[in-house]
Amino acid sequence: MGKDLKGKELGKGLDQIKDGKYRARYTTKLGKRLEKKSGKLQVVKAWLEDTKYIDEHCNVAFASQMSVDAWYDYWISIKEKTVRPNTVRNYRERYEKNIRPVIGYKLLFDVEPIDCQRIFTEMGEQNYKNSTIYQTRIALYNMLEFALDSEIIRRNPCKKSLRSNVGLEPEKKEALTIEEQRKFLAEVVGRSYENQFRFILQTGLRAGELVGLTWSAVDFEKKTIKVFRTVEYRAKSGTWQIGPPKSKSGLREIPLTEEAIRLLRVQKEKNSKLKVIALEWKDTVFLCKKGTPVKNSTYDSALFKICNAAGIRVISMHILRHTFATRCIEAGMRPKTLQMILGHSSLQITMNLYVHVTGEEKQNEIQKIEESLLIM
């Protein structure tokens, strides 16, 4: 069992070396010794899991003659066993829509940096957002890095020097202003999903976390909820996808306001009047009339109608979460506390993505320090 520099056990095949990097080592069934180093423990852990799986289940003989398509099929079959379903779905979508049309026919061994750049450039010309191009880059890099680790190619052609910021900048996701929020809350009264929309504005939950919330995770005495899963409906397969939050930071306990407690009690009463609740959803908090969770697309359709009726811009469930975060900062909540409530892995994500400073707020803040700036 390997240890880190502080003596903590990391597991078989893992350790931390003097320069601070983590190291994973593995010896194949044929006696070949493989090694991976990284500044991040999760990177070498994932590499070790993948390498073990390959050695135990797969045969890559003659892989140098594989087309990119063939290598992708092999690679994604392994990823299905080692990473989250959402990650696999994203890899598949980016490969099938953007990578395959450009290099799928080529031999893996023949892929050059110019081929990788062409994928990103064509996406830019097709008006893809930079965020989507970046996701494509991640999928491509990981697929090729896996080939490099398997010693099928000599280098990864998806180099750092390639430009992937060649698309459209994403639109700013601005929170509702206080006036917009008032109009929204006035319009939502009596509507089917009133409790859900109000609850996000009180807790900042992600849509999937809201759908996945269970009564067993609610503590009325402590006035908290525990977030431990997300639930999302997959229209393509007609199934509900249940899994953990986006990251370890997503596993959290959130304190509840009195309004949030009231909403939960109202919802509990509402659920008690349902004629039928499917056994698998009996512990689920927010249900529709059929006794099942509400689909994400249904929430979006409802928001579209509410916003139009209220005379405000159309928003998404994510903007409700964004609005909660902004109200918290405006009320003086410490950013670090907000980070924990939102379930972000870093404070920078909280500040950069969710906290929008309005013109009115900037004016109020400058007035507070006006006298200090006036030096005679």
Image (cartoon, rainbow, N blue to C red):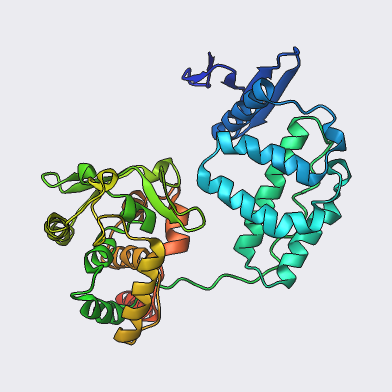
Which quadrant of the view contains residue 27?
top right
Does residue 21 appear to the left or right of 289 in the view shown? Answer: right
Does residue 60 appear to the left or right of 245 in the view shown? Answer: right
Residue occupying the far front of the picture: 275
**How many callouts does the rendering have?**
0
- Mark yes or no: residue 19 visible: no
Q: Position of residue 290 (x, y in %)?
A: 26, 59
Q: Position of residue 268 (x, y in %)?
A: 14, 55
Above or below residue 143? Residue 63 is above
Q: Position of residue 286 (x, y in %)?
A: 25, 56
Q: Residue at x 26, y 67 (%)?
A: 193
Q: Residue at x 68, y 22 (%)?
A: 55
Residue occupying the far bottom of the picture: 311
Does residue 46 appear to the left or right of 288 in the view shown? Answer: right
Q: Residue at x 24, y 66 (%)?
A: 198
**Pick the front one: 213 or 45:** 213
Above or below residue 13? Residue 285 is below
Which quadrant of the view contains residue 166?
bottom right
Q: Residue at x 15, y 48 (%)?
A: 223
- Quarter of the image containing the C terminus? bottom left
- Mark yes or no: residue 85 visible: yes
Above or below residue 120? Residue 71 is above
**Pick the front one: 26 or 54:** 54
Which quadrant of the view contains residue 107?
top right
**Pick the front one: 141 or 324:** 141
Above or below residue 49? Residue 161 is below
